[in-house]
Image (cartoon, rainbow, N blue to C red):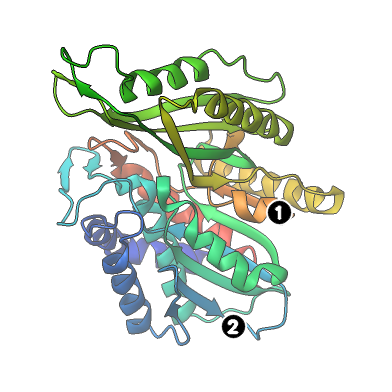
């Protein structure tokens, strides 16, 4: 339960935080091109007095709060990148109770809520409870960003991380298990030729289609939930040309380590089978996210974190909180035996579409959830 002075602060700054959300949401930030948002967030933190904040090589904005460089760390993170390739301002508008903008929920609403708590702590210093605190506005969570931001944080601080929170998603669910994945770019090359004059020559598109057919014939393992997908395919020159080149992006996912290993063998066997003398396949791993399995002590810590997160979210929303597996920034710390959770601070819909929106009326509840989640670790 939040103290009255903190509730008063939230009330007094909710309009400011809403304006901050609208400002950040319009700043373009494709994965691997997050410089503009990173610069904005760093300048914002520095204007609030965040001494020691910095941008690291992965384009994370990192702010160690009252950290002596030695004690165990609690990490709070919200990602700055979006799935959209735009390099010009993203379109934003209000429609009744909806704030509409690509990426406004995933993950800008959660980023703004976390930043609101940081500002409170800078204005009203509090002592952490036997932990250092690390705030991160991280890059590279989406797609082929391949979790570059959290990987860098774990390389830098991994041995000190005691617990980890990724603020991503909404108020109604908590991710406590990692869905691992491997993503491939598969290209096919062959001789090709004129569609009539060289009829019968091998066709790169047809060769790649055989790979697709093989993938969709896989019987997925029974352990956990396992999936596969071919997401894009392209190639060829014209309707009267036997294609010399084609390529595709494909993946498999699972929340079970054993199933990940089985799927890896399936995919590699398919690639080897279809890499003939007539059609040459080149396979490149373009993304890899590990599963995670905690030991008994770490699992006990995560169970306590989960019980508290559900208590906070249920207490504020009155709704049942769904606990599930997901592919998030938590994959990396979970693979390192660090208790980790992922959840967020808004209601909305349309994530990863240009019709994405957040419900404006849910944001105030989200602000309270952000404060309660973070200030739990302060005296």
Residue 229, position in %: x, y?
Answer: 46, 26
Residue 321, position in %: x, y?
Answer: 58, 34
Residue 302 shows in this picture: yes
Specify the label residue 241 is tagged with. none
Q: Tell me the mark number nearer the camera, choosing from 1 and 2.
A: 1
Specify the label residue 339 is tagged with. 1
What residue is drawn where x is 79% and y is 48%? 299
Residue 49, position in %: x, y?
Answer: 40, 86
Element carrying mark 2: loop
* Quarter occupied by the N terminus: bottom right
- Dot 1: few (<14), some (14–19), or many (≥20) neighbours within 10 Å? many
Q: Which badge, 1 or 2, comes first in the chain's sequence? A: 2
What residue is drawn where x is 79% and y is 53%? 298
Residue 112 image-quadrant placement: bottom left
Distance from label 1 to label 2 (Cα)?
Answer: 22 Å
* Quarter occupied by the C terminus: bottom right
What residue is drawn where x is 21% and y is 24%? 193
Q: Which residue is nearer to you in this view: 218 or 64?
A: 218
Q: Which residue is mark 2?
A: 66
162 vs 290: above or below: below
Residue 153 image-quadrant placement: bottom right
């Amino acid at each position: 339960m939040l103290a009255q002075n903190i509730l008063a602060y939230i009330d007094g700054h909710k309009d400011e935080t809403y304006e901050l959300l609208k400002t950040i949401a319009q700043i373009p930030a494709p994965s691997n091109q997050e410089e503009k948002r990173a610069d904005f967030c760093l300048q914002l933190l520095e204007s609030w007095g965040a001494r020691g904040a910095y941008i690291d090589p992965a384009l994370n904005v990192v702010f160690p709060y009252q950290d002596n460089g030695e004690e165990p760390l609690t990490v709070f993170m919200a990602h700055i990148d979006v799935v959209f390739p735009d390099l010009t301002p993203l379109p934003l508008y209000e429609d009744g109770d909806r704030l509409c903008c690509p990426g406004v929920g995933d993950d800008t609403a959660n980023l703004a809520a976390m930043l609101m708590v940081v500002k409170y702590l800078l204005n009203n210093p509090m002592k952490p409870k036997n932990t250092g605190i690390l705030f991160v506005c991280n890059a590279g969570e989406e797609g082929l960003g391949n979790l570059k931001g959290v990987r860098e944080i774990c390389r830098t601080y991994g041995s000190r991380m005691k617990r980890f929170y990724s603020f991503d998603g909404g108020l109604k669910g908590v991710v406590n298990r990692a869905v691992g994945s491997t993503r491939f770019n598969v290209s096919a090359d062959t001789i090709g030729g004129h569609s009539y004059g060289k009829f019968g020559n091998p066709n790169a598109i047809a060769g790649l289609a055989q790979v697709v057919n093989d993938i969709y014939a896989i019987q997925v393992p029974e352990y956990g939930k396992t999936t596969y997908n071919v997401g894009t395919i392209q190639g060829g020159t014209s309707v009267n040309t036997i294609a010399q080149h084609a390529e595709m992006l494909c993946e498999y996912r699972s929340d079970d380590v054993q199933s990940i290993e089985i799927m890896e063998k399936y995919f590699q066997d398919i690639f080897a089978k279809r890499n003939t003398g007539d059609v040459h396949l080149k396979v490149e791993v373009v993304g890899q996210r590990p599963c995670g399995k905690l030991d008994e002590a770490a699992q006990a810590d995560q169970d306590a974190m989960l019980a508290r997160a559900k208590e906070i979210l249920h207490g504020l929303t009155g709704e049942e909180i769904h606990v599930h597996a997901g592919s998030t920034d938590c994959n990396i710390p979970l693979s390192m035996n660090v208790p980790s959770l992922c959840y967020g601070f808004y209601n909305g819909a349309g994530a990863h579409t240009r019709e994405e929106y957040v419900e404006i009326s849910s944001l105030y509840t989200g602000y309270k959830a952000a404060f309660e989640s973070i200030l739990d670790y302060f005296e």
